[in-house]
Amino acid sequence: MQDYVDEGYAEEVTNEEAEDASGSIQCIALVADVEAMFHQVRVHKSDIDALRFLWWPGGDLSRTPTVHRMLVHIFGATSSPSCATFCLRETAEQFGKMFDKDVGDIVRNDFYVDDCLTSAETVERATELVTQLRALLKKGGFRLTKWLSNDQRVLDQIPETERAKSLTDVNLDASVKERVLGVYWRVQSDEFGFSITDTMLGKKFTRRNILCAVNTLYDPLGFAAPVTLIAKVLQQEIVRQKLGWDDELPIDEWRRWLSQLPELEKLTLPRCFKPPAFGSVAKCEMHHFSDASTQGYGIVLFVWKMLMDKCTARFYLANRRLAEIHRQTSPDQWRHVNSQLNPADDASRGLSVHKLIRSRWLTGPKFLWQTKDRWPTPPELKAQLPPEFQPVERKRIVVNVSAQSGSTDRLLNRYSSLHKLKTTVAWLLRFKSFLRSKISVPTGKLSVDELKDAELEIIKYVQRQCFAPAIDVLSSDGQSDRELQRKLKKSTHANSLSKLSPQVFNGLLRIGGRLEKAPIAFDAKHPIILPYDHNLTKMIIQSHHHDVGQCGTARTWTLRQRFWIIKGGAAVRKELSNCMLCRKRTVRRGQQQMAELPFARLKPDEPPFTYVGIDYFGPFMVKRGRSETKSYGCIFTCLTMRAVHIEVAPDLSTDAFINALRRFIGRRGRPKEIYSDNGTNFVGAERVLREALQGLQQSD
């Protein structure tokens, strides 16, 4: 931590601030690492206070710690990988044009967080990529180091200080082995493999240890999928037997499976799909093999390449989902392969390590190494298939659906805050006024009148969308009241609006009523009508609910003094049910589940005071002569029948309790079990009685 402070990655917070509460795979592989990638990316000044911590100045633990804060992104934070990756890609966007095109593509596509994994066709191109990648990332403040390659000629062009630790002062040989994103890579031979450690040595064969041993076999590409299938099947057998996590397993299959794991180190697969000296590829295909059995299902993919009459097949991936393959293929690409030729048959039934190393699982079936005219032909189907296998005729129905969603609707549904929506609309209305008349347009911050006008315009639009037929009927002139009511009943929302005697005032649909002469505000006489299920209605309820201090339904529903919502009570209750503060405040308390009664409480066939609980109560002031002394009550309770026996104790000493216990036994008989708390007199009495019993046993 002191190094972070000394190097400028963190700074001390001042007292004032502390008080403030606000590609393709080619033959030459290249692997590198961005040094301290997260620490090369600064945190924005407005966010650095979220990374405060306490630290002793100068690392002196005897001093009072002071408040510091990180200025760069830290390891372990959820945001660090995305922020650092963004800066890495931004470096390629800004400076990529100064280098070759594929250099920028490598930064965008061949980086996994801070690890660079790419390849080149020739030594010259690999050396050029190393130089340009280092120069490009240096412009963004990143240092690309710990270089590793399977070609010694490429490594010779890289300074030793920039190579991986395993290659410092060492030439490339068979002993150089690295893990690339967790996968074991033999660098010189350019092959993937496994490194097995005997994790079960000296341990019991328990369910917990077996699970640990299976999970240590990291195999993301499914190289050893047939081997791990056997372990998974055995784990299912353990579950069916309902064995505990630490019960020793009587299964010999586990011992045989674990004993063969060291042989996995002999299993190797070439990293590059194209064999050395293969020449130019005339055709490249990907072949998927799948199979299923009662134990499991498996899929294996092979890359098939052809050069004139020369073919090759390389293992690509195993255990991929069938659904993904099905979505990206057509029926004419599928073929039937019998079990003798299907390599996926090994994944669905399992293989031992010895058989896996020499199996078709790694090399593919023999016919893939031949031209297509020698491949197996699909079997001929019977002329008459059973009814359940008859093809189903599918009928296609074309339906045209048109959905109209204007820009205003999208604007209303975008916001969840009424104030933000009014502010946005107010700015739009000011801009509209500017376009119409560039002379008398207000400037500066929005006024209260502008926010009110924006709210009315929003309400007018929503009413026009929801109550358009009713507004058209009420806005027409020269109609009698009876005719208006008749037309209003035929419009939409007739049942909800007809009882409200709606009227249109200045383009707003309001309630009519008989309160015209009442000495109250106009909005209270004629509240604005709003639809039940609309985003604007939800925002108005939420805003008023916040204004009244997160009160209940009755208090929130006072908004009807200005707005009348169709089915308003239900709308308010619905919104309040989604309010997290209200839900936390009104949640029911958790009820503690009482434990099972002890054995001593459930023996009604025993005599009273067979199982006894003891405690003291008091003190009581007792007059002796001219003085007063303290006395205590010792209560003996029968745990089964709740009978009570009380003895008087002069004090809280051990001797006083033993005397009280002797009097109790003399009167009620000897109990089988006595329960008490850890009072000093009870603990002392237990010790005295235990030592007395030990003395009697020794004398005998």
Image (spheres, rainbow, N blue to C red):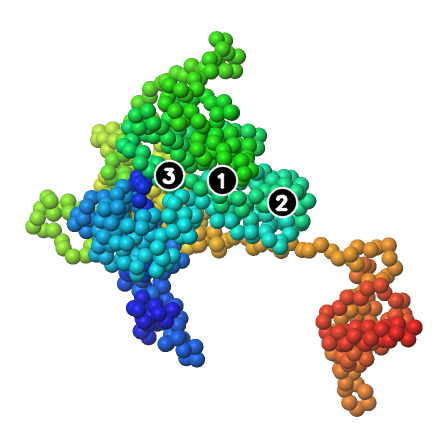
Callout 3: SS: loop
Q: Which mark is residue 255?
A: 2
**Distance between the Cα atoms at labels 1 and 3?**
57 Å
**Distance between the Cα atoms at labels 2 and 1?**
18 Å
Amino acid type at circle 2 is Arg
Quadrant where the C terminus is found in the figure: bottom right
Rendered position, 233 above or below 163: above
Q: Earlier in the sequence, mark 3 or mark 2?
A: 2
Residue 620 locus on image (x, y percent): 75, 79
Q: Earlier in the sequence, mark 1 or mark 3?
A: 1
Residue 627 locus on image (x, y percent): 77, 89
Rendered position, 433 above or below 699: above
Rendered position, 419 above or below 458: below
Quadrant where the N terminus is found in the figure: bottom left
Visible in this render: residue 287?
yes
Q: Residue furthest right?
A: 700
Quadrant in which residue 21 is drawn: bottom left
Q: Which residue is mark 3?
A: 533
Residue appearing at x 77%, y 87% in the figure: 628
Q: Nearer the viewer, mark 1 or mark 3?
A: 1
Q: Nearer the viewer, residue 250 or 617?
A: 250
